[in-house]
Image: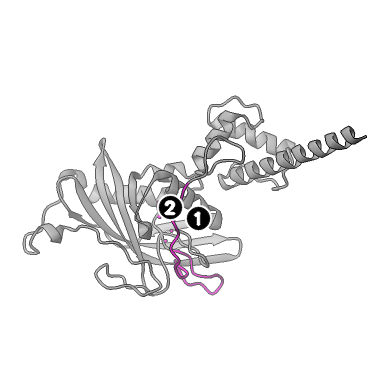
């Protein structure tokens, strides 16, 4: 009798663990836009079909079963290890408290009567505790990078500019690889990637470690995790350049680009929109432009 009771307890514990793991996988697939069913922990035909499709997309055997290779793919794409998988959860730097603000790959924060203002971020977004964040930041900050922002904004760290190396009367002409046309196209592509629900395409615009908004230098895992949270928070996002991009050479290897965007984000009936000024520092890596630093400020309307 005692042995039978022990077996029942063990079976129940295994079932609960399996249900919890299945629910976690459902959540990850849903965040990636690969699953639209309920988050109930049940391995339903709909869930199995979604898992098979995910495996096929990643060139894995479409078994519909969470094997180690599939778990690793989910770990890599979401930046968070599944319960019981070999990958350790990402170690993220301490989050700094900030007031409401909105998207950073385009990792932007608005004030909307229907929702708390989002946090700014030009992809992959740093979420504020009480508001959204597109590629921009909290309420009514100064649009100038030289003025001190309002205490509610994240103060951008200093980024080298052409003025630091040359006299204002003799500006440095950006090298050919930093032409305004090329950088403008790069930023448009970056913003477009920030509108999608897949994290990996957004990460390709960065060179790691990257000086990431108010967080300072961070690695790829941190940016992946931060972006995924923002995508979950605001499933629908739109970014648009509103002014010509201003490019300044720092030296032969790096340049800065200042640009202004209009953003709008939405989740269900909650919406937020606004404008942010942004600065990225770029470097050419293997013939491709990469962001090595990114900052943003909310523009007062």
Of residues 211 and 278, the one nearer the viewer is 211
Q: Is residue 137 magenta?
A: no
- Specify the farthest residue to the front: 2
Quadrant occupied by the N terminus: top right
Task: Check the image and report above or below for 286 versus 191.
Answer: above
Q: Which residue shows up at 35% across the image and 51% down it?
A: 188
Quadrant occupied by the C terminus: bottom left
Q: Which residue shows up at 54% across the image and 61% down it?
A: 266
Helix, strand or loop for disc 1: helix
Which quadrant holds residue 212? bottom left
Of residues 160 and 167, the one nearer the viewer is 160
Q: Which residue shows up at 50% across the image and 63% down it?
A: 132
Q: Earlier in the sequence, mark 2 or mark 1?
A: 2
Task: Check the image and report above or below for 7 versus 109.
Answer: above
Q: Give the side of residue 65 with respect to residue 289, left or right.
A: right
Task: Check the image and report above or below for 140 versus 75.
Answer: below
Residue at mark 2 to residue at mark 1: CA–CA distance = 7 Å
- Specify the farthest residue to the right: 1
Q: Dot 2: few (<14), some (14–19), or many (≥20) neighbours within 10 Å? A: many
Q: Is residue 105 magenta?
A: yes
Magenta-colored span:
91-119
Q: Which residue shows up at 30% across the image and 44% down it?
A: 290
Q: Say whether residue 179 is visible.
A: no
Task: Return the mark for residue 124.
Answer: 2
Place of residue 257 in the rendered image (x, y in percent of width and height, measured from the top left): 25, 56
- According to the picture, the residue beneath numbered tag 1 turns out to be 230
């Amino acid at each position: 009798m005692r042995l039978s009771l022990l077996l029942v307890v063990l079976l129940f514990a295994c079932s609960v663990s399996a249900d919890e793991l299945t629910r976690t996988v459902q959540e990850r697939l849903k965040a990636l836009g690969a699953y639209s069913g309920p988050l109930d922990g049940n391995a339903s035909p709909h869930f199995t079909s979604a898992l098979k499709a995910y495996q096929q997309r990643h060139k894995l055997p479409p078994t519909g079963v969470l094997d180690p290779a599939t778990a690793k793919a989910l770990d890599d794409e979401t930046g968070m290890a599944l319960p019981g998988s070999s990958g350790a959860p990402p170690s993220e730097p301490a989050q700094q408290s900030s007031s409401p603000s909105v998207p950073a790959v385009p990792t932007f924060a608005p004030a909307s009567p229907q929702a708390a203002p989002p946090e700014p971020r030009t992809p992959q977004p740093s979420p504020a505790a009480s508001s959204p964040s597109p590629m921009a930041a909290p309420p009514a900050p100064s649009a100038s990078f030289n003025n001190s922002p309002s205490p509610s904004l994240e103060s951008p760290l200093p980024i080298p500019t052409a003025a630091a190396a040359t006299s204002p009367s003799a500006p440095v002409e950006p090298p050919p690889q930093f032409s305004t046309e090329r950088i403008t196209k790069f930023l448009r592509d970056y913003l477009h990637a920030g509108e999608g629900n897949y994290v990996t395409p957004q990460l390709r615009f960065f060179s790691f470690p990257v000086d990431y908004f108010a967080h300072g230098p961070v690695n790829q895992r941190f940016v992946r995790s931060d972006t995924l949270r923002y995508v979950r928070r605001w499933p629908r996002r739109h970014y648009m350049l509103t002014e010509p991009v201003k490019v300044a050479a720092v030296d032969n290897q790096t340049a800065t680009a200042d640009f202004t965007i209009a953003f709008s984000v939405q989740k269900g009936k909650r919406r937020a929109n606004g404008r942010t000024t942004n600065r990225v520092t770029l470097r050419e890596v293997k013939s491709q432009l990469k962001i090595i630093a990114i900052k943003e400020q909310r523009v007062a309307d």
